[in-house]
Image: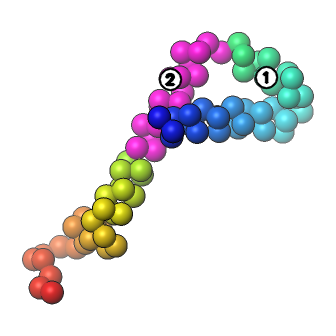
Amino acid sequence: MLFFLLLVVLSVLEELLVGKVHGHSFAQTLAEYQRHSVLELIATGLLLLLVLLPLIATQELNRVLGPGVLRHMLFDSGSPRAE
């Protein structure tokens, strides 16, 4: 839930910056952004979350398994190393 809220906030900030770069005031950009429905904003946030989900999952797996274990499991071929 935290990642979802962070993505929504960052999406709003991105839209504000894009509007500013294109020469619009913050008020104009916010008025344009408010015309979007709440469902559209939720859908955008969920889409971004789905895009970031593999990154988050990979980072967590790497943290839980230990440094280098996931990389070894995914990319090293042949028999497991004898330690």
Please say whether residue 41 is visible from this viewpoint.
yes
Residue at the location (54% across, 27% down)? 44
Q: Name the residue: 72% across, 36% down.
A: 13
Q: CA distance from mark 1 to mark 2?
A: 19 Å
- Mark count: 2
Q: Is residue 1 above or below residue 61?
A: above
Name the dominant secondary structure of the magenta segment: helix
Q: Is residue 46 above or below residue 10?
A: above
What sort of colour scheme is used for the picture? rainbow
Q: Quadrant of residue 19?
A: top right
- Residue 58 lies, in percent from the top left, at 35, 56
Tell me the number on the disc at residue 43: 2
The answer to whether 5 appears left or right of 32 in the picture is: left
Q: Amino acid at mark 1?
A: Leu
Residue 16: image x %, image y %?
A: 77, 33
Amino acid type at circle 2 is Ala
Q: Magenta segment range?
A: 36-53
Dividing the picture into quadrants, the one containing residue 24 is: top right
Image x and y of residue 25, in percent: 89, 28
37 inside magenta stretch: yes
Q: Which mark, by number, is residue 30?
A: 1
Crowding around mark 1 (Cα neighbors within 10 Å: few <14, some 14 to 19, many 20+) is some
Decide: is 40 above or below 58. Answer: above
Is disc 2 surrounded by few (<14), some (14 to 19) or many (20+) residues within 10 Å?
few
Give the x, y percent position of residue 81.
15, 82
Q: The residue tagged with tag 1: helix, strand or loop?
A: helix
Query: What is the number of the mark on residue 67?
Result: none
Give the answer, above or below, for where 6 lies relative to 56.
above
